């Protein structure tokens, strides 16, 4: 069967630069002197630390327990000794720190006891839990936990394996498909079963002929309904929504997930990791990383997670004019602020950048509304309109023009003849909106807290007044009961006067409280705790002091 | 710090404008060979004026001069002003037109990319209102030698009736107003007509079409505006022509005469002042064609494109707002 391909709007064709590293087989990167394994493997959740400094760990041993539904476990990526817990820079544009386990490898690379896991022999939930304990997350981009994406196992028609790899320079998925096609497809078959799909499509950009051939060859030996589809090479064909669109014609609606449309997408690296976890009992402790760019020896390496970028770079030999390093591709990657940042589950590529390869953008010129950005936008946005609104800080209008549908793929900025860093404007506007929403939420919370405090103080005052009144009534009853005991009356006189005064105060307070409530509920409407009228009354402690 | 994307297509405003200038060359060549070689002198005058005016106003606005001058947008404006003005205008009218376009229309609104109106069209409208007789003097194709043309442009020598003729559009208009005249009889009487449009001017139209196709191939413009403009002009004129062939000129005449082809590819397609959404472009260009036809046939001016463009420029914000394309994942909902 030949799949009918669909089109997505826009897209660009930057120079691919894949030849630099695509012909180089995956080699094992040597272990660094120290591994830094962040307990936070994704933005969404951090794991709870399970080890203490001085402890010896084996390769694949759990060192962090995933917490919450989005948590996945974290593992030691080689055997060695835990030498500390320290904050380390995350591979994130913010350059923020996160807590990491530092391991000194002992060089033996000794595995924990590995046992294959029969996902068919256990309930589905148990299989998903197992993947979570193996630390399997999406290796293509966001690192979303795989067990969550597998969902509830109902209604998924099409499983898509993403081998598009549309960013320039990156070749790790290409090499993985060429060298481990059978394993990738084995992982795909497991995902297929777990998600309950009816067919599996593997989308690969047609500039990766060898990968397509290898995958087709491996698929020929399968009985499962797996189809290898060559898709046109056009960035960002590997974007999840774009790939789903190209392969199935389905357009995932805004704010919806693929599962709701009967389709789900996993990266080839993820499929490979699932295969290792199920058939070999190996948690996710390494991944393929492309080292390329302005280096003497580009290549693809199997790298232990936690390997600092700087030790990895030694393998590639950056040339002297390298001025910075990118993690990810040149379209959506980030500049690495700190070279001690470790390789994580989503770190697919390190590019050495030089002014010759990635020249600084020419000065920004005025927008001439030529519409090139709109023609390139894969989300069918009008980036120049969003740009005008962002410039004017008219974030409301930007939101109305679907700012949050921007996937920040960079196509608009790539084609802009005025060299406007459009994506930066959109990031700014998005953060501006988030900040406003946070502020709004914070002020809402502050208002609620204030109103509750007033309500509480009022309630306490009333309770105290009622208590006093009850006590006074009790005393009065007692007094009237022992009217004959007149000899004590003289001694009681000052006390009686005090009680009478307190009673009068309490009555008066109760009266004003009622009228205050009535007035406030007029002013604030029903349900709003009143605060205005009663704050002028004496503090509860005042009456305490006199009684 | 520089953020992603780290790579860029080697495109620039300068290369866009340069492509537009190159695309104008076939039309200009036809102009020189068929109508008036003096247009080259006008282009030179206009270019110098535009660059000087741009530099001066940038200096007054305390902006960097070199990047703005080198983007070539002022040159494009200057050339378009010249190409829509009569070629034998005294030089100061050209200078005045360019000054209006650059200073008043472009920079008083904030410079490149900010002007809501098409600069060349404002210049044309202002000049035809201010100097109606000068702006109506068109040389008959191939009748004046270069020296005479140059004298007219640089000197003040004006023996108007002897040397100027009517344009095809003008001749058709006035011809049809005489009693008993039909399109047929007017076409036979007057020497202004060629095979389908104005004599000699037909070649200019072809030159502009060639340039337009070049810009389409280079993806400087999209098909929407030229197609919508040409199709609408053809359909509207076709309806009138079919209804009363004796009173209304055929569609091909309207397309090949006046500034129709220059407008279709170079004027209507101005990105800064035009509509930007795909459907908006169709509406914008079609609107210009309808208004231009009505002015040509029923209005006070023989040529109506300039007024039509300005009127539609007014509608651009509304058109754009109402024609936003559906966003991925939002089909069926618009802001």
Image (cartoon, rainbow, N blue to C red):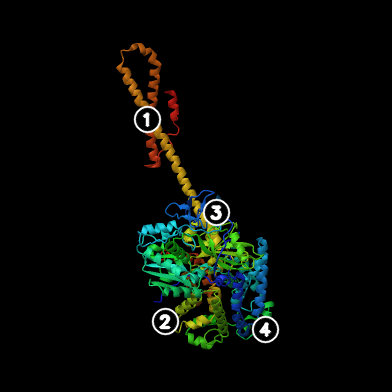
Closer to the eye: label 4 or 3: 3
Same chain for labels 4 and 1? Say yes or no. Answer: no
Task: Give the class, few, some or many, for how many residues have Cα within 10 Å of label 4's Cα (few <14, many ≥20).
Answer: few
Q: SS at mark 3?
A: strand
Task: Give the class, few, some or many, for how many residues have Cα within 10 Å of label 1's Cα (few <14, many ≥20).
Answer: some
First of labels 1, 3 by sequence position: 3
Closer to the eye: label 4 or 1: 1
Q: Is residue A475 visible?
A: yes
Q: Which residue is mark 1?
A: A510
Q: Position of residue A101 (x, y in %)?
A: 53, 52
Q: Which residue is mark 3?
A: A103
Q: Chain of mark 3?
A: A
Q: Which residue is mark 2?
A: B243
Q: Position of residue A27 (x, y in %)?
A: 55, 67
Q: Residues under labels 1 and 3: Cα distance?
A: 68 Å
- Horizontal side, residue B37 vs residue A108: left or right: right
First of labels 2, 4 by sequence position: 4
Looking at the picture, tell me which residue is in the foreground, B316 or A535: A535
Q: Quadrant of residue A17?
A: bottom right
Q: SS at mark 2?
A: helix
Q: Residue at x 34, y 26 (%)?
A: A470
Q: Which residue is mark 4?
A: B146
Same chain for labels 1 and 2? Say yes or no. Answer: no
Task: Give the class, few, some or many, for how many residues have Cα within 10 Å of label 3's Cα (few <14, many ≥20).
Answer: many
Badge count: 4
Q: Residues under labels 4 and 1: Cα distance?
A: 106 Å
Closer to the eye: label 1 or 3: 3
Q: Are marks 4 and 3 in contact (CB under 8 Å)?
A: no
């Amino acid at each position: 069967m030949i799949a009918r391909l669909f089109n997505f709007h826009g897209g660009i064709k930057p120079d691919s630069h894949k030849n630099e590293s695509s012909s180089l087989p995956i080699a094992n990167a040597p272990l660094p002197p120290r591994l830094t394994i962040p307990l936070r493997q994704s933005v969404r959740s951090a794991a709870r630390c399970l080890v203490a400094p001085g402890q010896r760990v084996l390769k694949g041993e759990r060192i962090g327990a995933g917490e919450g539904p989005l948590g996945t476990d974290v593992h030691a990526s080689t055997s060695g000794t835990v030498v500390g817990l320290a904050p380390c820079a995350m591979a994130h544009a913010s350059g923020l720190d996160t807590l990491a386990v530092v391991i000194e490898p002992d060089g033996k690379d000794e595995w924990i006891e590995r046992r294959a896991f029969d996902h068919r022999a256990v309930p589905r939930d148990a299989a998903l839990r197992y993947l979570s304990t193996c630390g399997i997350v999406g290796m293509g981009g966001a690192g979303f936990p795989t067990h969550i994406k597998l969902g509830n196992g109902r209604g998924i028609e099409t499983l898509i394996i993403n081998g598009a790899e549309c960013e320039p320079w990156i070749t790790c998925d290409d090499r993985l498909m060429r060298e481990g096609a059978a394993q990738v497809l084995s992982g795909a078959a497991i995902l297929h079963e777990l998600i309950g799909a009816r067919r599996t499509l593997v989308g690969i950009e047609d500039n990766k002929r060898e990968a397509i051939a290898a995958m087709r060859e491996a698929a020929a030996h399968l009985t499962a309904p797996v189809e290898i589809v060559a898709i046109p090479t056009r960035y960002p064909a590997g974007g999840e929504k774009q790939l789903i669109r190209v392969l199935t014609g389905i357009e995932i609606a805004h704010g919806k997930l693929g599962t709701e449309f009967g389709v789900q997408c996993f990266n080839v690296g993820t499929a490979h990791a699932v295969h290792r976890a199920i058939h070999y009992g190996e948690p996710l402790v390494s991944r393929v990383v492309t080292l390329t760019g302005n280096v003497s020896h580009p290549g693809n390496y199997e790298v232990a997670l936690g390997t600092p970028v700087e030790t990895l770079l030694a393998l590639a030999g950056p040339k002297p004019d390298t001025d910075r390093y990118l993690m990810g591709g040149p379209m959506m990657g980030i500049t690495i602020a700190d070279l001690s940042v470790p390789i994580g589950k989503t770190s697919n590529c390190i590019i050495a950048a030089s002014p010759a390869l990635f020249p600084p953008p020419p000065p920004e010129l005025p927008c001439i509304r030529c519409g090139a950005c709109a023609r390139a936008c894969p989300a069918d946005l009008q980036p120049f309109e969003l740009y005008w609104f962002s410039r004017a800080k008219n974030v409301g209008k930007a939101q109305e023009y679907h700012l949050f549908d921007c996937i920040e793929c960079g196509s608009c900025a790539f084609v802009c003849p005025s060299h406007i860093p459009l994506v930066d404007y959109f990031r700014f506007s998005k953060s501006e909106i988030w900040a406003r929403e946070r502020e709004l939420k914070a002020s809402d919370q502050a208002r609620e807290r204030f109103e509750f405090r007033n309500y509480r103080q009022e309630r306490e005052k009333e309770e105290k007044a009622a208590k006093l009144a009850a006590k006074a009534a009790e005393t009065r009853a007692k007094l009237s009961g022992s009217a004959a005991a007149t000899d004590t009356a003289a001694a009681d006189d000052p006390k009686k006067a005090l009680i009478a005064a307190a009673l009068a105060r309490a009555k008066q307070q109760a009266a004003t409280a009622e009228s205050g409530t009535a007035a406030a509920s007029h002013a604030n409407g029903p349900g709003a705790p009143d605060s205005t009228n009663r704050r002028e009354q004496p503090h509860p402690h005042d009456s305490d002091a006199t009684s | 710090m520089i953020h992603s994307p780290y790579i860029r297509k080697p495109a620039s405003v300068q290369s866009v404008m340069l492509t537009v200038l190159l695309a104008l060359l076939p039309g200009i060549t036809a102009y020189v060979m068929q109508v008036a070689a003096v247009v080259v002198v006008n282009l030179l005058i206009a270019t110098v004026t535009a660059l000087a005016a741009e530099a001066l106003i940038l200096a007054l606005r305390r902006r960097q001069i070199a990047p703005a001058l080198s983007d070539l947008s002022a040159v494009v404006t200057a050339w378009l002003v010249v190409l829509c003005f009569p070629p034998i205008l005294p030089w100061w009218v050209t200078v005045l037109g360019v000054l209006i376009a650059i200073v008043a229309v472009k920079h008083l609104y904030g410079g490149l990319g900010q002007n809501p109106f098409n600069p060349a069209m404002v210049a044309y409208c202002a000049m035809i209102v201010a100097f109606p007789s000068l702006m109506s003097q068109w040389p008959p194709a191939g009748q004046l030698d270069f020296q005479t043309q140059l004298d007219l442009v640089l000197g003040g020598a004006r023996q108007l009736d002897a040397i100027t003729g009517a344009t095809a559009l003008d001749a058709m208009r006035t011809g049809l107003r005489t009693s008993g005249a039909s399109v047929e009889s007017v076409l036979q009487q007057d020497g202004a007509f060629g095979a389908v449009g104005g004599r000699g001017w037909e070649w200019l139209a072809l030159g502009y079409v060639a340039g337009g196709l070049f810009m389409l191939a280079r993806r400087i413009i999209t098909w929407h505006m030229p197609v919508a403009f040409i199709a609408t002009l053809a359909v509207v004129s076709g309806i009138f022509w079919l209804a009363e062939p004796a009173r209304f000129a055929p569609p091909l005449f309207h397309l090949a005469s006046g500034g129709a082809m220059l407008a279709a590819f170079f004027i209507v397609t101005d990105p800064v002042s035009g509509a930007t959404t795909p459907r908006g472009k169709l509406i914008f260009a079609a609107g210009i064609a309808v208004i231009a036809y009505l002015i040509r046939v029923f209005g006070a001016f023989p040529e109506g494109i300039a007024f039509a463009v300005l009127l539609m420029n007014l509608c651009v914000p509304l058109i754009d707002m109402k024609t936003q394309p559906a966003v991925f994942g939002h089909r069926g909902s618009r802001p």
